[in-house]
Image (cartoon, helix red, strand yellow):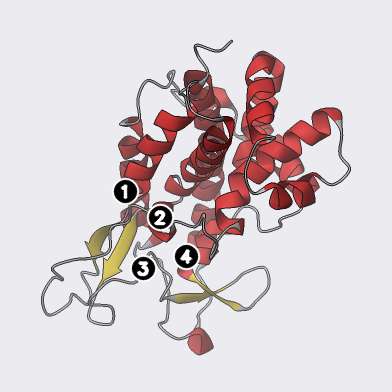
Amino acid sequence: MVSAAIAYDELSAQDGRIVERVVALAEKHPDRGAFEVAIGRAKGEERGRRIFLELARWPDDTRGSIHDHPTWHYWSRPIVDKSSPPAKLPEDVPEGAAYEAFALNLSVASDPRASASERAVALAWIFHLVGDIHQPLHSVSQVSKRFPEGDRGGSLQFVLDPVAAEPVSLHWYWDDRVSRDGEPELAMERAEDLMRRVPRSQFRLQPFKSATEFSVWARESYQLATTLAYGPDLRASDSAKTAPEQPKRYLDESLQVAEQRLTLAGYRLTEVLRWAFRNER
């Protein structure tokens, strides 16, 4: 939702016609109930922004429904816990299909011949996948003696949440490090704050050109997972009951990196949408 709010703010200021096209297509989304709840009584600009936010979260909202694609949320490669390697490397660690899903949905969303409802669903997945793949733990699965088949992107390891002082999976620690509230107003405020502190000029951004760039973003996340998320400062347990606190350096560095990745995802989403609607302005 935060990355979608960043894209909305950028496009509404610089390329309002794309916002209009996205909103018009989203109005034809087949799962109207989720969008009506998210929009509420909002009108005008607020309505458009809330539609952007719901597009980004809808693939999570629809889990378990006919629209669900569980393997689309990640594109994992194994990393070995060098301090406790498995007896032998697994022959197959679930990789996920995020890259294929992104390419497929980008093709549909950018095709003016596709139906509005198909394009709306595809847009929702694009919004969501751009955010997901910038999260380091959507790109890896650690294999070790404890997890010879992989820890499912940190879902099987636990740490103590520094905010709530409760155990959470390592995966959720990273996903929630920057923003953990589903309220649109808070997501919008967080986006504005991040755009001030992590400006677009901090990154060497280029116009989006093809779906293959998704693999570059995944490799960035994989590298961050290797050096930081599963780095030497991590303290984790395979039991929620014994979830440990994290060293201050890990808390500080993970917050800084999570903020950068989330903000970069928003800027890159802007470029993806510009590309998708390049022939419809």
In three-dimensional space, the C-alpha distance between marks 3 and 2, rounded to whole angstroms, equals 9 Å
Q: Which mark is residue 171?
A: 4
Q: Position of residue 61 (x, y in %)?
A: 61, 57
Q: Position of residue 44 (x, y in %)?
A: 85, 28
Q: Position of residue 228 (x, y in %)?
A: 38, 56
Question: Label 4 neighbourhood size at 10 Å, few (<14), some (14-19), many (20+)?
Answer: many
Name the quarter where the N terminus is drawn: top right
Give the foreground label among 1 and 4: 4
Q: Is residue 247 left or right of residue 152?
A: right
Furthest-bottom residue in this view: 241
Name the quarter where the C terminus is drawn: top right
User: Image quadrant of residue 199?
Assistant: top right
Q: Is residue 75 left or right of residue 46?
A: left
In three-dimensional space, the C-alpha distance between marks 3 and 1, rounded to whole angstroms, equals 17 Å
Which amino acid type is marked by label 4?
His
Residue 179 seen in render = yes
Q: Is residue 200 above or below residue 52?
A: above
Which residue position holds label 3? 152
Question: Label 3 neighbourhood size at 10 Å, few (<14), some (14-19), many (20+)?
Answer: many
Query: Which badge, 2 or 4, is on the more N-terminal residue?
Result: 2
Which residue position holds label 1? 223
Q: Residue at x 38, y 64 (%)?
A: 153
Q: Is residue 231 above or below residue 8?
A: below
Query: Which badge, 3 or 1, is on the more N-terminal residue?
Result: 3
Q: Is residue 184 above or below residue 249?
A: above
Which residue position holds label 2? 138
In three-dimensional space, the C-alpha distance between marks 3 and 4, rounded to whole angstroms, equals 9 Å
- Asked if the residues shown at circle 2 and circle 4 are in contact, with their CB atoms under 8 angstroms apart, the answer is no
Q: Position of residue 117 (x, y in %)?
A: 58, 36
Q: Residue at x 32, y 36 (%)?
A: 216
- Asked if the residues shown at circle 3 and circle 4 are in contact, with their CB atoms under 8 angstroms apart, the answer is yes
Query: Which badge, 2 or 1, is on the more N-terminal residue?
Result: 2
